[in-house]
Image (cartoon, grey):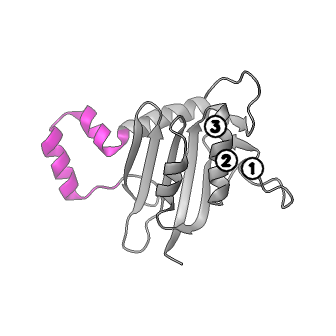
Amino acid sequence: MGDRTPIQVVIYSCPPDLVAAVLDTLETYDIYGGAHSPNSLADPRLTELELGVCCSRIESSVGSSDEIADEFPDQAAWKVWEDPAYEHLGQLHLHHPDLGRFSAECDAYGRAVFTSLEVDRLAAKHGSDLVQLRHETGLTWEQALEALAAANNGIVLPREPSPGSAPL
């Protein structure tokens, strides 16, 4: 068994027809929290997805965040990060349907971390172009996900969409 570290997931938006796929991924990796917990031992399937809730697992294999991010649908907006393990930084993945995916090393709070050399490189490359700097550091994604959190936080989506459901 390899190194283990905590992992966190927040879903900010998800089309109703993809909720089951997101819940299946959470179940596969035993990630739970908020409304995301099995009904009972007799029925371990998750039945609903609450947007904006941080779900977690205390011990997950290092590298699981990459696998989870690869499994989540591109039409959903989400944040997945695993905490640092030993001397290694964690891994952060942010995704917004309009922006695509951003990945970087991170701290235990899911904040992107850059070395001074990387900061110097970004400053030399973009100078005072704040739009490009925000894009390269993930701030563009963070701001887009914060806007979705403000709009969708607390919305609960059922595993099976009702007929005529509008996408979120």
Instruction: Name the spot of residue 77 as percent of width and height, x first.
Output: 52, 38
Residue at x-position 79% and y-position 57%: 44
Between circles 3 and 1, the one closer to the viewer is 3
Is 118 inside the magenta-drawn segment?
Answer: yes
Is disc 1 in contact with disc 2, using a CB cutoff of under 8 Å?
Answer: yes
Amino acid type, mark 1: Leu
Is disc 3 in contact with disc 2, using a CB cutoff of under 8 Å?
Answer: no
- In the rendered image, is residue 111 in sight? yes
Going from N to C along the chain, the mark reached first, 1 or 2, is 2
Quadrant including the C terminus: top right
Instruction: Name the spot of residue 33 as percent of width and height, x first.
Output: 67, 53
Is 57 inside the magenta-drawn segment?
Answer: no
Amino acid type, mark 3: Leu
Amino acid type, mark 2: Leu
Which residue position is annotated with label 1?
Answer: 46
- Residue 72 vertical placement versus 65 (above, below): above
Check residue 23 in the rendering and tell me which mark sits there, or answer none: 2
Segment tinted magenta in the rendering: 113-139
Pointer 2 local density, CA inside 10 Å: few below 14, some 14–19, many at least 20: many
Q: Quadrant of residue 153?
A: top right
Instruction: Name the spot of residue 152 as percent of width and height, x first.
Output: 61, 32
- Residue 34 vertical placement versus 155 (above, below): below
Residue at x-position 60% and y-position 66%: 58
Going from N to C along the chain, the mark reached first, 3 or 1, is 3
Instruction: Name the spot of residue 23 as percent of width and height, x first.
Output: 67, 47
- Residue 122 vertical placement versus 87 (above, below): above
SS at badge 2: helix
Which residue position is annotated with label 3?
Answer: 18
